[in-house]
Image: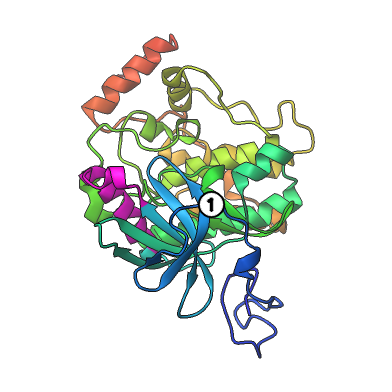
């Protein structure tokens, strides 16, 4: 039996999840799971996981539906493309995702079950199989999510990221495509953070060169835009952009020119979420705007602080942290000469004067 909320598995005699009380359902019938044809059908990975079909493929890896021959459960197996086997950076990035995922044990983070190397040297990772769709797919179809649905999911997303931060991991690429919604189409009940391929761990610091921006630019924090190191508040900004899109149906900044888009993330306050979008509660707007502050000290200090405000908005109980005064001007202060030079370029690009004392 399977818990549809936390994905824990139990023997057939169980009827409710001891962890969260959710009524259990029979585990998915692997024969009913849709896949694409693949020449790898029948291949056994790691002596245990038999490939049943292709789930999807990207520029770096392929993801297959497989059956765990030990448990009978469906799993997802991700294998690095053969053309990247001689690329040490690509292999390191792949192993980073595996290492990061294996460090985190939380209901709202995709569980990595196994990691290994095939006989040809290709690394693979085995993940729990999830049934549902990405938040990105949901938003492309429905555009806006109401607060009653969004707030519980946001608390779950933030809780998963808080667990990552406690494990010393910064995701660095929070976006709707990296959040998976479990449940029936249009009625998700559980969110899981996925894809830690750009995560920042102490043992993998050498993967990112100084001044290298990592992430997806539409969701990139000011510190990322100038190449400074990411930290926990970087993920808070990324989640702030996700919240903005969930409640408004749009992202704060949308430009065809990448440099101009990054310059806006670095310099320009986002339009208020309520602008052109009726029905957004002031307390929700305040939370989103605090998550999107440029000055790190004006942003939520921790993911737990953001969770606290999301819970207070869901069940009103006193003032939120979002209403606290901020330090003006709300600007990010570059930490390195490279970042300062990049900031100067953005100011010239948008015809913005340098801050006083600079």
Left or right for 24, reference 302: right
Q: Which residues are magenta?
A: 80-101
Q: Is residue 89 magenta?
A: yes
| Numbered disc 1: secondary structure | loop
Report the magenta stretch's main SS. Answer: helix
Task: Give the labeled residue for mark 1.
Answer: 37
Is the residue 304 above or below the residue 8 in the image? above
Q: Nearer the viewer, residue 5 or 267?
A: 5
Quadrant of the drawing holding the N terminus = bottom right
Q: Residue at x 63, y 74 (%)?
A: 27
In this view of the protein, can residue 228 be seen by the observer?
yes
* Count of numbered marks: 1
What percent of the width, then of the height, locates residue 80? 34, 51
Left or right for 196, reference 270: left
What percent of the width, then of the height, locates residue 81? 34, 47
What percent of the width, then of the height, locates residue 30? 60, 68
Is the residue 230 above or below the residue 64 in the image? above
Q: Residue at x 53, y 53 (%)?
A: 55
Q: Is residue 334 magenta?
A: no
Question: Image quarter for residue 347?
Answer: top left
In this view of the protein, can residue 302 be seen by the observer?
no
Quadrant of the drawing holding the C terminus = top left
Q: Nearer the viewer, residue 207 or 261?
A: 207
Q: Residue at x 65, y 51 (%)?
A: 319
What percent of the width, then of the height, locates residue 61? 39, 48
Q: Residue at x 57, y 41 (%)?
A: 242
Is the residue 262 above or below the residue 205 in the image? above
């Amino acid at each position: 039996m399977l818990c549809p909320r936390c994905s824990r598995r139990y023997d057939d005699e169980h009827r409710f999840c001891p962890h969260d009380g959710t009524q259990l359902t029979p585990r998915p019938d692997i024969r009913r799971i849709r896949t694409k044809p693949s020449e790898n059908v029948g291949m056994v990975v790691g002596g245990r996981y038999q490939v049943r079909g292709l789930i999807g493929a990207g520029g770096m890896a392929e993801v297959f539906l497989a059956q765990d021959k030990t448990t009978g459960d469906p799993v997802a197996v991700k294998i690095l493309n053969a053309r990247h086997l001689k690329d040490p950076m690509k292999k390191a990035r792949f192993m980073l995702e595996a290492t990061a995922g294996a460090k985190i044990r939380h209901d709202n983070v995709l569980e990595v079950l196994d990691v290994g190397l095939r006989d040809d040297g290709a690394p693979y990772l085995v993940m729990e199989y999830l049934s549902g769709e990405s938040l990105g797919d949901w938003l492309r179809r429905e555009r806006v999510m109401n607060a009653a649905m969004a707030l519980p999911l946001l608390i779950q997303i933030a809780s998963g990221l808080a667990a990552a931060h406690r494990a010393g991991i910064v995701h660095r690429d929070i976006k709707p495509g990296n959040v998976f919604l479990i449940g029936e189409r249009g009625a998700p009940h559980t969110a899981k953070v996925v894809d830690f391929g750009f995560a920042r761990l102490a043992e993998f610091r050498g993967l990112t060169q100084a001044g290298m921006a990592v992430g997806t630019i539409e969701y990139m924090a000011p510190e990322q835009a100038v190449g400074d190191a990411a930290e926990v508040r970087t993920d808070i900004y990324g989640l702030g952009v996700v919240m903005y899109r969930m409640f408004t149906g749009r992202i704060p900044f949308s430009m065809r020119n990448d440099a101009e888009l990054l310059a806006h993330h670095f310099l320009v306050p986002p339009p208020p979420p309520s602008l052109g979008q009726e029905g957004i509660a002031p307390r929700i707007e305040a939370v989103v705007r605090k998550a999107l502050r440029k000055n790190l000290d004006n942003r939520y200090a921790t993911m737990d602080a953001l969770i606290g405000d999301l819970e207070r908005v869901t069940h009103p109980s006193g003032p939120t942290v979002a209403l606290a005064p901020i330090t003006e001007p709300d600007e990010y202060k570059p930490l390195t000469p490279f970042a300062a030079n990049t900031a100067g370029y953005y100011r010239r690009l948008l015809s913005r004067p340098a801050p006083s004392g600079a």
